[in-house]
Amino acid sequence: MQLDDRKWTILKAIIKTYLETGEPVGSRTISKFADLNLSSATIRNEMSDLEEMGLILQPHTSAGRIPSDAGYRLYVDYMLEEKDREVTEMKELVLQRQDKMELLLKQMAKLLAANTNYAAMISGPQYHRTKLKFIQLSIVSETQILAVIVAEGNVVKNKMLNLEHGLDQKTILELNILLNTALNGLTLEEINLGTIAKLKEQAGIHSEVVNRVLDAVAESIQKEEEVEIYTSGATNIFKYPELSSSEKASELISAFEEKKDLVDMISQDAQTDETGIQVYIGQEAPLATMQDCSVVTATYELGEGMYGRIGVIGPKRMDYDKVVNTLRTLMAQLDQIFKKE
């Protein structure tokens, strides 16, 4: 069923108002919507057309209207189609950006190693203090619903929830509106006990479903992504006699090849809560294998809660001024490139 923009806007206003109040909706109430610059008389005419189309009902004479099953169906189908399209577009955007980012970071690691003559590493961006963008619940079967959770940075997580009792489309619609109204734009830290208690109270007999969705949200936001590390210039270590002994060089080369130690170093570095350039000399180095070296790290930020680490590993007699200036230039370039995306 096709509706023109005016009828569709009025139908959505009736459904949203009725879901919030549980009371029949009159033309005067609808006229107060900011995006409707229509008189009550015009709205009444449109509501009469919607009633003839079977999309709204007038339960009592002189009363306002409520949505019919057909009206709910049209609204739910449109909403799910719109959200599916948004999720698909986000996934495509994320994949495209990930491909570009991987190539870019590999090139940056090579550039950093070449410019400094030391070993270099760059981690892929991770998400911190992620905010929730929206939740979409969809019926999969009588006992299963799919929760699509989209977080800041367009991170999309799918979670299948098993239910003891099935839900109808109207209930799913009400839960979608309830969850998104209460949670959109919040970080996990901001979804406190008061927010959760209020949500459960509003959900009534479906409070357990809300609880399951909240668990899925927490899992999606908290879950650490696998850290990608891009390295270059490990063989530069052999240029420095104090590092080129077989044992020391072997340990450093191994760290760059296996990358697990580098992930640990990034994790330890991240716990300092420092976002500027950090310099570790000798025994200060985050890893035992690097305590004959100097390690210089920096944090780059790509917006929307995305951060990554850049590191340079070399002898204690490294050219600190050159390394720090190179890192600052690299961070500025990453920032500039990302803002053009």
Image (spheres, grey):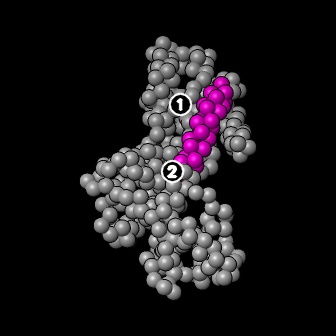
Residue 166 quadrant: bottom left
Amino acid beneath label 2: Val
- CA gap between label 1 and label 2 equals 25 Å
Residue 150 circle label: 2
Residue 94 drawn in magenta: yes
Frontmost residue, 281 versus 210: 210
Magenta-drawn stretch, dominant element (helix, strand or loop): helix
User: Which residue lies at the image location 36% right of the left edge and 67% below the top edge?
Assistant: 203
User: Which residue lies at the image location 70% right of the left edge and 42% below the top edge?
Assistant: 341
| Percent x, y of residue 187 | 48, 58
Q: Nearer the viewer, mark 1 or mark 2?
A: 2
As helix, strand or loop, the secondary structure at mark 2 comes to: strand
Frontmost residue, 19 versus 195: 19
| Percent x, y of residue 171 | 39, 62
As helix, strand or loop, the secondary structure at mark 1 comes to: strand
User: Which residue lies at the image location 52% right of the left edge and 67% below the top edge?
Assistant: 54
Which residue is label 1 attached to? 229
Residue at the limit of the structure toward the bottom, as seen here = 62
| Quadrant of image for the N terminus | bottom right
Query: Eyeballing the image, is 306 above or below 55?
Result: above
Q: Is residue 153 visible?
A: no
